[in-house]
Amino acid sequence: MLLILLILATLSGTAAACTVFAVTPGASDDGSMYAGHTNDGVGFDWRQRDDISLTYIPAADHAPGEKRVIVFDPVSGSDAAGHSQGDGSAPVLGYIDQVPHTYGYYTASYGMMNEHQLLSAECTEYAKIQLDAEEGKRIFYSSELSNLALERCTTARAAVELVGELIETYGYYGTGETLIFADPEEAWVIEMCCSPDGTGGLWVAQRIPDGEIFVAGNEFRIRDVVPGDPDMLYATDLFKVAEEHGMWSPANGTFDWLEATSYGEYSHPYYSLMRVWSIQNRLAPSLNLSPYVGNSYTRALPFTIEPDEKVNITTALSIFRDHYEGTEFDLTTGIAAGPFENPYRYLGPADAHTDFQNASYIEVRAGANPRPVSAIFCSYSYVAQARSTLPDPVGGVLWFGPAVAYETVYAPMYAGAENVSSSYLIGNRTQYDPDAAYWTFDFVTNWAMLRYDAMIVDIQAQQSELELQSIEAIQVTDQEAAALIADGDDDGARRLLTNFTVQRGDEIIDEWQRLTGMLIVKYSNGLITDPATEEVDEPGYPAWWYQEAEYQYGPRVYDLEALRETPGLNYTGQTVWVPKNSSFEEIVGLL
């Protein structure tokens, strides 16, 4: 029991403000299922660290009568609860019966993928009712639920049913939450929140139609809950509780899950919906979806979309790489992006992850930056892939990317592997460690902000090359591992998949550290130095920035006072030669 507790105590982390998607087999070019998640958190958990690393939980057998400990999640939006065990570092909320065998899986803040190609992804929502955890009464938050589903289930529907049963039996606390569960054939979305009864919890699930793509970003996406719909599941007392507590009445018509349980977006208008629109618009531009909506309860953005083109692996890995480029919300343009098209913004008071609306009021803040899909505060992101044409250990691939999605490299990790590169297993945000995968990538993102427009070209070239190499290597390893399994050599296949996973992770870290050294040399001190030719360029700033910065009013003449009092002097980039005895009026006439 102590060993289990110590393992589980490493799993909590920051998980606010995430973006998720699912691409069903009929929407992908090769029949793959994809589920993606960005873990966009900025806080610390009760161990004064946050999860920027990966954990692999091995499969295990359990003795009859053994219990599975349920620990409190400090980033659930709930006050701390439960009693301490051992050294007092792990608040325990309760225990449930263990099962005879649990599956191996990847996790960090939330479960990602297990050895049977069951995939999961998560995002947080504000719900109208958010209760604190209570020992023995409300013991589950979505993080533990996702891990339990991967420990015990092999299909998406079974995962949804298990999560729903656990919520109703043991109670739910904290924020509203969305979980995606997907297997090689089918994908489901389950959304959950606290019950006004104070016990159990409310939840509803909807199947994602094959051939469609689902996207969410910190707002419930399920709307009409129709009894008898074979593509929907929900809490047994959903309608009864909602009616008794004034959340909904049959006289109002069909039960609207979003409107009954949530105020919609949080932080500020378009915080959630702009991300949903951007991804849907990129994948299905023929829909001509408008980014503008009337309010949080809009139905303008559909639950799922059919993509204009089938999604391949390269496209799947690019979905989170989005700063609204090419749209009117493009974060690489404008004065806030600076002279070098930096898409990242410092977080300010108006960007706080707090609810800005309730039943009666909307807080109109001073302003806010658009919230991109690729956020500067991202801990990690991943795209989990499941393939029905391959055995489970081979078909499942977790493409894991540390730090910010736009500048990361997704490293492939097989479902059948039993270890990963050590760089992905270490690190925290309070101590720089160049050997940690997170810091390897986060440093490059931050260094790139010195001259983003130039450095992103070098970054993307190396990023594309490394991911293409991984895609090609996966194809070879797939065949070799599948052949071993077909010959009955499961152990040999696992060794192959583990060796590949560890080696490829090491290679990506090594290559990114080499890139880091090159970028430091090439872009130090405001210069651009060609490492090959040793030529040095002094590029300065773009003309529009010189104009905005009033560069033309700088020390060009000795009569600076008169120069600064001259209105409408535009930057042209041109120089003129004048006699030394020229008057200021003669000079300014030439400028």
Image (cartoon, helix red, strand yellow):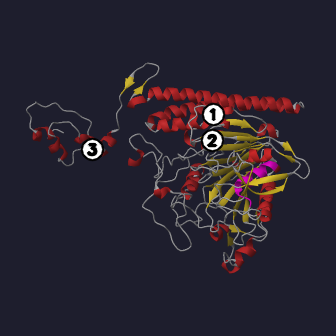
- N-terminal of the two: label 1 or label 2? 2
Position of residue 296 measured from the top left corner of the image (x, y, whole percent): 56, 65
Q: CA distance from mark 3 to mark 1?
A: 43 Å
Quarter where residue 79 is shown? bottom right
Task: Name above or below for residue 424 compared with residue 6.
Answer: above
Neighbours of disc 3 within 10 Å: few (<14), some (14-19), many (20+)? some
Query: Which mark is drawn over residue 317?
Result: 2
Position of residue 311 measured from the top left corner of the image (x, y, whole percent): 65, 44
CB contact under 8 Å: marks 2 and 3:
no
Asked whether, in this view, residue 462 is left or right of residue 539, the answer is right
Q: Amino acid at mark 3?
A: Glu
Q: Is residue 156 visible?
A: no
Asked whether, in this view, residue 126 is left or right of residue 571, the answer is right
Residue behind mark 3: 550
Disc 3, SS: loop
Q: Magenta segment, which residues?
A: 139-151
Q: Residue at x 10, y 41 (%)?
A: 585
Quick check: is 143 in the magenta stretch? Answer: yes
Position of residue 236 measured from the top left corner of the image (x, y, whole percent): 79, 69
Q: Nearer the viewer, residue 318 or 355?
A: 355
Q: Amino acid at mark 2?
A: Leu
Disc 2, SS: helix
Q: CA distance from mark 1 to mark 2?
A: 9 Å
**Quadrant for the C terminus in the image:** top left
Q: Residue at x 35, y 28 (%)?
A: 538
Query: Which mark is drawn over residue 467?
Result: 1
CB contact under 8 Å: marks 1 and 2:
yes
Position of residue 83 measured from the top left corner of the image (x, y, whole percent): 73, 57
Asked whether, in this view, residue 326 is left or right of residue 186, the answer is left
